[in-house]
Image: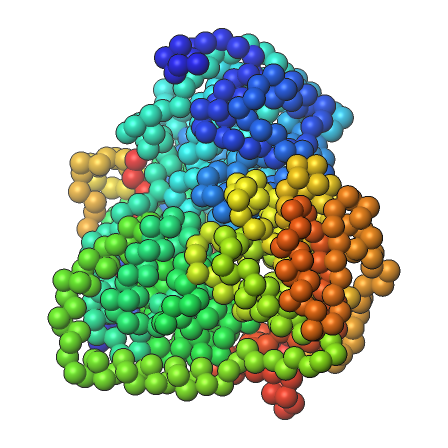
Amino acid sequence: MSSNIYEGAVPVSVLKDTDVYRHTIAVLVDNEAGVLARVVGLFSGRGYNIESLTVSVVDDDVQLSRINLVTSGTRQIVEQIKAQLCRLVPVHTVKDLTDEGPSVGRELALIKVSGTGDNRVEALRIGDIFRCNVVDSTTDSFVFEVVGTSEKIDAFINLMKPLGLAEVSRTGVAAIARGSSGMEDKASPKPKAKKTVAKKVTKAKAKTSPKRKSAVKKAPSKRTKKR
Amino acid sequence: MPRDTLEGRRMNGAKILLKALQEQGVEVVFGYPGGAVLPIYDEIFKQNQVRHILVRHEQGAVHAAEGYARSTGKVGVVLVTSGPGATNAVTGLTDALMDSVPVVCLTGQVPTHLIGNDAFQEADTVGITRPCTKHNYLVKDANKLAKIVHEAFYVARSGRPGPVVVDLPKDVVMEIGAYSTAPRGIKRQQHKTYRPAHSPDPASIEAAVDLMINADKPLFYTGGGVINAGPAAANTLRQLVKETGFPITSTLMGLGSYPASGKNWLGMVGMHGTYESNWAMHDCDVMINIGARFDDRVTGNLKHFSPNSHKIHVDIDSSSVNKNVIVDVPIIGDAGVALSAILKLWKERKAQRKAPSKTKALKAWWMDIEKWKSRDCLAFRQGKKTIKPQYAIQRLFELTKKRKTFITTEVGQHQMWAAQFYRFDKPNRWMTSGGLGTMGYGLPAAIGVQLGNPDGLVIDIAGEASILMNIQELSTAVQYRLPVKLFIINNQYMGMVRQWQELLHGGRYSESYTDSLPDFVKLADAYGMAGLRVTDPAKVDDTIKEMMAIDGPVIVDVCVDQKENCFPMIPSGAPHNEMLLGPDDDANRTVSEEGMVLV
């Protein structure tokens, strides 16, 4: 007797994987009072991990908000997080951007570096390499605006540390799937489970490490709540 | 009033609320008045359609609504005031959430302009109840009130049922707004975002039947989901068990979906489940879980839980699947629909099951089960002097089984003995606090059950410690002439606490003995109801008969053996096949450190 999986179910072998992966999940919700508290309360109440969370209205006419969140956990935990999110009444759609085909994620950061002399020149030069905008300047400080992947921003911050890093403000990740279909596009075929890269993180380094190992993983989950 | 003329009619919020309740078919509301809900109580006074039952504590109101809901299949409704009214309801709401009981709880709130100002009797009800409800609403506009109430009922009863709070600021129930009628027909099922699963994926059914056809040691493991899916689902389950010939066990919440008198019945599973059902869970090769959620009271140590089985899991809530136990075949949908689909496919394919090897395997599996059954794990020795609690419940069952009997319980040893010795043949007859384990559940729940089933014989099998947690509800029972019977298994200890202290904490009975208990017979008298006491085993039958003969609420104080423990028992952290069978069995067992930290 084989472990008999029908299409659509997450295979047991995948769920038993004890490695921790980072997932970016997009959630479309009704823009109503308390909806963010519901999502955040779910994570704190069940002990899930939030690495980054952004939320903003995306459609004023129908009062729809989008929450992008980055979380890490074993596959079992990530599946559980998605199912729990789907269960919330004001949630329209839950989409695992890491699992369902390729996606892009960007973050904006404002980074204050203070110092004079060579350090100041070096900071400006590196800022140039990272295509930063300087949005504020005094004779002994810069505020850089840097846009990119979380890794790029991590890298920039690390470079600024010896040069007088004073303050960091990051927006968190805004992410979107590649391709022509929208998040709630029913007609469009769902991206087939191609090889996508889920970032594998070791438990100890889950939150802070700039060095992130990659592991190629299949994305078998299809559990999305459709409108 | 006809529906057409109702739509858009202008009236005050309180009237809108009452009209919406009437349109939802609400017959009974359990509540307690207070400042913030006075306008609503004024409206209740002016109408006759919705009956209000005045409880004595808001927790009792929610449990009564739960009892009403679970015995009738309808949504239970609660009305409480702001602040302490709402916070007192929180335990009941959490209980309803854990046990998936459809309840709509209407809470008063201070006027909108005072919200956030620490006003008198203000509490952040929506904030407090967010994690203990399925969903909650704060109504800020009387024009939206009717729509929100209709939606609250839809959310409470659909999918996996649960409690929903509607918080009603006083100014909103006093201002004038337009009524909107409940959506009908196809629209009724179309919520903007909330669309629970109903029909499972046919591929999942096929995969499940595949596993079942090829099973050598199959086992049905059913739970409260079958009860929630309605009596038709229980019927389908009975047919399926008959067709397949597989053994069946059930969780605490699922008792009654398959009759305890049925020949494939193994008894309850779990920490205090029967020896045969726990061994069957451990040894089976295909486990068919229908509407149960692999609760830790059932699985015990997850590392050793049913190590060699393929697992099928039917659940309407996808977040229950793969939460505690990773399963091979998840089936997301209504238990009744899934059972019908499985039954249909099984009938089509059962020829494949005729192979001699399969018949032989199932026969061998039943022989294993008979061997376990022969251990007679529920045996007890009733002497001549003191009443054994098991005996009292066994006699209660024998003497009441021919009536339309509903049993509620509190929480503790008596609850487990009730589950073991009261044998349920029908669904919706058994009301107990399973998930949350709320002491004080049984009496108010019995009140709710009796209101929903005026012709039923409603008995709360209680413990003397639990019953005191909501004893004030006796007054409610007397006021409404509800003939509920309280069958108190009185051992003067918090029995389950005492048992754990004996088995796990070296017999140091820290604070588990209750001194200065009330005289329950006099207490009954004080409330204006009948009180009986029995201490002699020979008089148990007569006392039960006397209790049944009294046309009104009765307390029966059954003074039982103080030292009796509830067996069988799987100690914390132990696998299913290492259960304790009785007092002589635990001599050489020590509970591991790992097990000690578990509850």
Left or right of B147 on screen, residue B65: right
> Residue at the bottom extreme?
B588
Can the viewer see residue B227 in this picture?
yes
Left or right of B241 on screen, residue A46: right
Q: From this view, report whether residue B46 is shown above or below residue A199.
A: above
Q: Residue at x 81, y 63 (%)?
A: B514
Q: Quadrant of residue B219?
A: bottom left
Q: Nearer the viewer, residue B366 or A177?
A: B366
Q: Quadrant of residue B77?
A: top right
Q: From this view, report whether residue B249 is shown above or below residue B384.
A: above
Percent x, y of residue A216: 28, 62
Can the viewer see residue B97 in this picture?
no
Q: Which quarter of the rendering shows the C terminus of chain B?
A: bottom right
Q: Nearer the viewer, residue A16 or A121?
A: A16
Q: Residue at x 14, y 66 (%)?
A: B349
Q: Nearer the viewer, residue B276 or B524?
A: B524
Q: Nearer the viewer, residue B143 or A133?
A: B143
Q: From this view, report whether residue B420 is shown above or below residue A79.
A: below
Q: Which quarter of the rendering shows the N terminus of chain B?
A: top left
Q: From this view, report whether residue B285 is shown above or below residue A194.
A: below
Percent x, y of residue A17: 36, 67
Percent x, y of residue B582: 61, 83
Percent x, y of residue B353: 17, 74
Q: Residue at x 68, y 62 (%)?
A: B543
